[in-house]
Image (cartoon, rainbow, N blue to C red):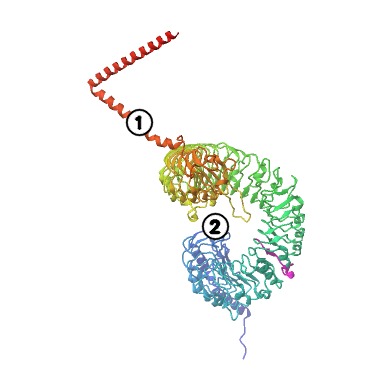
Amino acid sequence: MHPTPTNPPLILSFTIIVIVVTSFFRGGALQQPGGGACWSSERAALLSFKKGITSDPGNLLSSWRGWDCCSWRGVSCSNRTGHVLKLHLANPDPDIDSRTNHAKSYILAGEISPSLLSLQHLEYLDLSMNYLGGGGGETGSPMPRFLGSMENLRYLNLSGIQFAGSVPPELGNLSKLQYLDLSATVDTVDDLTLFRNLPMLQYLTLSQIDLSLTVDWPQKINMIPSLRALDLSYCQLQRADQSLPYLNLTKLEKLNLYENDFNHTITSCWFWKATSIKFLSLGQTSLFGQLNDALENMTSLQALDLSRWQTSENVTDHYYTLQMIGNLKNLCSLQTLDLSYSYKSGDIAAFMESLPQCAWGELQELHLSGNGFTGALPHLIGHFTSLRTLELDGNSLGGRLPPALGNCTRLSTLHIRSNHLNGSVPIEIGVLSKLTSLDLSYNQLSGVITKEHFKGLTSLKELGLSYNNDLKVTVEDGWLPPFRLEYGVLASCQIGPRFPAWLQQQASIIYLDISRTGVKDKIPDWFWHTVSEAKYIYMSGNELTGNLPAHLGDMALVHLNLSSNNLTGPVQTFPRNVGMLDLSFNSFSGTLPLSLEAPVLNVLLLFSNKIGGSIPESMCNLPLLSDLDISSNLLEGGIPRCFATMQLDFLLLSNNSLAGSFPTVLRNSTNLKMLDLSWNKLSGRLPTWIGELTGLSFLRLGHNMLSGNIPLEILNLSSLQFLDLSSNNLSGAIPWHLEKLTGMTTLMGNRQDISSIPLGYIRGNGENDISIDEQFEEVFLIITKGQKLKYSKGLDYFVSIDLSENSLSGEIPSNITSLDALINLNLSSNHLRGRIPNKIGALNALESLDLSENRLSGEIPPSLSNLTSLSYMNLSYNNLSGRIPSGRQLDTLSADNPSMMYIGNTGLCGPPLETKCSGNGSTISGNGTGYKQENETLPFYIGLVLGLVVGLWIVFCAMLFKKTWRIAYFKLFDQFCNTIHVYVVLACASRLARNTVVE
């Protein structure tokens, strides 16, 4: 039997056809678009997901068009199968809110479509820091349960999405999941045991989820033996001292428990058994006591965070420090140590010596800020050759910086600000070629910094030398710095008098502060072009000259402070993106620009210049403007009507020539906290609607021409702390029920804090790591203690009433004594009568009291001696009587001539006057020439005048209507005149005859 002959080419062709057809159907080639690598079903799923996105301001999904979805932004596919494996749509620039861990700005908003279930091969999903909880940015729908059906997921990051409710239990079905980040995603987790169903889970982050009601959380976490990293920071956990008979977390390398409220001793914590831990964060956990010996067994530790920690109350800080350091001796792998804000005392040299010597060459980061370390930084710092970060801000270190710092050649960050360092800066600093951030601000350094100090700082991006008043930076005009700074903070150093030419090479600068640096020069034209992309520029307190650049409106500035210089010329425009602009205390002239484009401008300070004309309506084109100060200029006219639509918090227009009545356009300005219209030419009455501005804390209307009564509605301003209506033409009585002004009481809960003024009437701070301290400061001249005093930083605590130099009458309201936070009370130069309130001694915060030049009578209340804070008093030119009370504080007032504060009160007796009291000395009468006598005789004269007028009118009317009376009256009048005439003639003749006889 012969075998059947074969045909090899036919068999080969058939085999190829079978393979192709099989691959065709198994691979789903029928679903593939011509020439594309994307599966049509998966492309449709992605497009359906896109439909659920209601907002995409960053155009993240703008590339999602065409057939090949694998080329779309954020989509990654398998090179072999074409299936979508990865979807990465995280917010690339979320600008995280440090308080909530949520993004301040989003790139996607909407909801997550269940169409993602069609991506059956998806292994990686990252939608973090977007608003995908439904509702377009507000916490909305619960976390989708269908996510638990995406069974191939290995990586899932939904952090910051802000779902409502809890984590759905279906998430426990993702058996292949290795990485899960749900930080700030949901409100809570009902049951931590759902994660034990994830056998491959290695990284779990539940940061900023409320776990306060979770019972025995360590036991439940212990059921996930695969864990390598666990982040439970900001979870409001209550305890960490639960007992674990057996530890399953043998692979755990990273444990972050930062900012929880354990509030028990650290010795009982369960995690000391996890000796595999390499990263341990226990900062701000309310743990206390000494570290136990278990720390010696944590030999794998590479990073230890004990920042903002507590010590045992019965252990001194120094002893505790040494005990803790002794327990670090076996941590030879230690690379990062954070003990910031944990201690109150200790010598820095002893601390450094106690660090594990085996780790000196390994330690890379040392964070010791905010402690009480004293002494000088030791020379042994040079042995820490691997150091990249050294932070010692906010301690009490003294002495000189050691030259040995030059041995730390890997240093990238060196921060020793806010200490007591003195002496010169060692030139060895100049060899740190990897140094990117150097901050030595707020010390007492002196000497000269030359180009040799900067010679090798080729990587320097941040330089802080501010507030070392005796430190001088001296370099040649032609010096070319080796660095390109982004942050340069040199305030209150000496870099003048020439404008620093080396800034011409700093085109990358973002933040520049050369305030109060002794520069007395013209701002060169090249400077404004060099810093055209800078966002923060502060050059106040110098003697700079020149004009503002023509291209100011095109600059990228967010903050610009040129105050207290000698700049001139007009202010033609504002930087378009500016949020704070301070040009005060200069000599700018001309008028304010008629056209303005600064849509985000919040604070505008132009006071103390020579700007004239009227306030233009262009000011109303600044929609976010809340703080406006154009005081002390040459402005005329009134406030534009369009101001009625603005929501100002602070409006200061004092010391101009504004005229007209009190501006009605302010009636809707209910946000106003501070209003200063003093030293203008305002006239008319104070409107009753002023009581509707209930947010006012500071009201200053003095030195105008206002008239009429003080409206009772002013008592509705319960937040008022400062009231100045002095030097007007106000009349009538002071309103009663002053107790309604609770902002002037010590009930601090009812008082507003004027220090919240963002423009910095007290002090402004920026959002950067390098603060903008003392950049913006408003100065007010306030008449108190008999003189003009400047108030700036203390203004938020200054509680004052000044109604002086008006025509107010009536008595001083007795309930004024309920305003026990008053520091200054000035009612002088009015027509007030009656007695000084008996309980005036209840104003225990009072420092200045002026009631002079009124018509007050009676005795001086003895309670006045209770005013222990009083440093100035004037009761002169009244009609007070009786013995002057004495007291330790009263006896010290006006030491040079104490009687002057009582002069013009002739009824007073006793020291410091020379007039002695009669009898028991209780009272002594006046001489009848004071205001009291005037008050008593006033009714008599009024009655006399009225009687005379009425009598004359009766006689006149009678003669007008009765003809016979008129004839009789005039006949009698003629006879009377003739009789007088005859009498005068005879008398004169008789006198003349006698004189002739005598001669």
Residue 560, percent from left and from top: 60, 47
Depth check: 122 or 204 in front?
A: 204
Q: Is residue 429 visible?
A: yes
Quadrant including the C terminus: top left
Q: Position of residue 262 (x, y in %)?
A: 56, 70
At 35% from the left and 30% from the top, the residue drawn is 945
Question: What amino acid is at disc 2?
Answer: Gly
**Which residue is disc 1 drawn over?**
944
Residue at which label 2 appears: 58
Q: Position of residue 298 (x, y in %)?
A: 67, 74
Against 904, residue 425 (above or below) is below
Q: Does 361 lie within the magenta span? A: yes
Q: Tell how many labels.
A: 2
Residue at 69%, 72% in the rendered image: 327
Query: Badge 2, how many Cα within 10 Å: few under 14, some, many 20+?
Result: few
Question: Of the residues under marks 2 and 1, which one precedes in the sequence?
Answer: 2
User: What's drawn in magenta, residue-wise?
Assistant: 354-369
